[in-house]
């Protein structure tokens, strides 16, 4: 069994048909998620001083259209993650994403947005390769210095479907050339940078 995300893992999202793509996700990607979860979970549990649970996306509601990406999430809720700020690792066909995610299902989204607006200076202390997205369904993301951060956070606060995700994008060819240890260390390093934000915006 492979222990990292291969070129074939990313090519999964170019396969036609829901069943074929889901089978490839289960074979090529989810076993790596499970291993990453076992490695990263203890770190997050210690850093956050609370029990954290791994959730691997199953795409169970999909009946026709195959998923364009897949992911795992780390959350303090055993039953789910979308209703809380959470950490993600996932793949599109051309990149890996490592996120701290505040998505639209958050019931008190405006409170998190207000705190992020108050503490946005912390976001500017992150390494220069960190990026921001305002929609987890879209591939594109912008470097912090290239986006209007305040404008994006105001939209996140005021628009029901708006989201806020911060972390790293790593190109597929770079990821597939990494060893498993290099990949896990990258995820750990990214989360170590994001944990202070998570804690400050509680």
Image: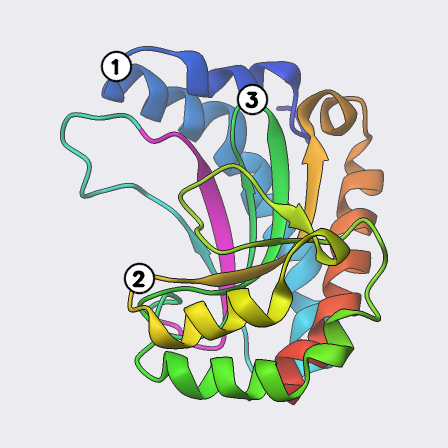
N-terminal-most mark, 1 or 3: 3
- Of residue 81 and residue 134, the one placed in the foreground of this image is 134
Residue visible at 77% across and 36% down?
180
Q: Secondary structure at mark 2?
A: loop
Q: CA distance from mark 3 to mark 2?
A: 30 Å
- Specify whether 6 is left or right of 85: right
Residue 109 lies in the magenta stretch = no
Q: Nearer the viewer, mark 1 or mark 2?
A: 2
Residue marked by disc 2: 161
Please tell me which of labels 1 and 2 falls first in the chain: 1
Answer whether residue 75 is magenta in the image.
Answer: yes
* Residue range highlighted in magenta: 67-78
Q: For the point 48% across and 44% down, which residue is it?
A: 71
* Quarter of the rendering containing residue 58: top left
Which quadrant would residue 7 be assigned to in this image?
Answer: top right
Q: Looking at the image, do the residues carrying marks 3 and 2 touch, with CB atoms under 8 Å apart? A: no
Q: Residue at x 33, y 26 (%)?
A: 22
Determine whether, in the image, residue 1 is placed left or right of residue 29. right
Question: Is 82 placed above or below 201 here?
Answer: above
Q: How far is mark 1 from mark 3, CA to CA?
A: 16 Å
Check disc 1: other Cα within 10 Å, few if <14, some if 14-19, many if 20+: few
Q: Residue 156 in the image: x percent, y percent?
A: 43, 69
- 202 lies above or below 65: below
Query: What x and y, as percent, mark residue 43?
Result: 73, 69
| Residue receiving disc 1 | 17
Q: Secondary structure at mark 1?
A: loop
Mark 3 or 2, nearer chain start: 3
In the rendered image, which residue does mark 3 sit on?
A: 9
| As drawn, 8 above or below 147 | above
């Amino acid at each position: 069994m492979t222990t990292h995300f291969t070129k074939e893992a990313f090519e999964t999202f170019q396969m036609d048909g829901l069943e074929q793509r889901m089978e490839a996700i289960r074979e090529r990607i989810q076993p790596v998620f499970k291993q990453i979860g076992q490695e990263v979970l203890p770190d997050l549990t210690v850093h956050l001083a609370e029990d954290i649970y791994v959730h691997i996306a199953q795409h169970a509601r999909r009946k026709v259209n195959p998923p364009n990406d897949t992911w795992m999430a780390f959350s303090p809720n055993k039953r789910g993650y979308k209703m809380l700020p959470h950490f993600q690792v996932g793949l599109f066909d051309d990149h890996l994403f490592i996120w701290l995610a505040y998505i639209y299902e958050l019931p008190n989204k405006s409170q998190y947005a207000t705190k992020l607006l108050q503490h946005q200076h912390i976001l500017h202390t992150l390494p220069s390769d960190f990026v921001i997205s305002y929609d987890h369904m879209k591939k594109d993301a912008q470097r912090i210095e290239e986006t209007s951060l305040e404008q994006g956070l105001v939209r996140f606060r005021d628009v029901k479907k708006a989201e806020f995700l911060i972390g790293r994008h790593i190109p597929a060819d770079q990821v597939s050339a990494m060893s498993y240890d290099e990949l896990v260390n990258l995820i750990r390093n990214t989360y170590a940078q994001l944990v202070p934000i998570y804690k400050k915006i509680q």
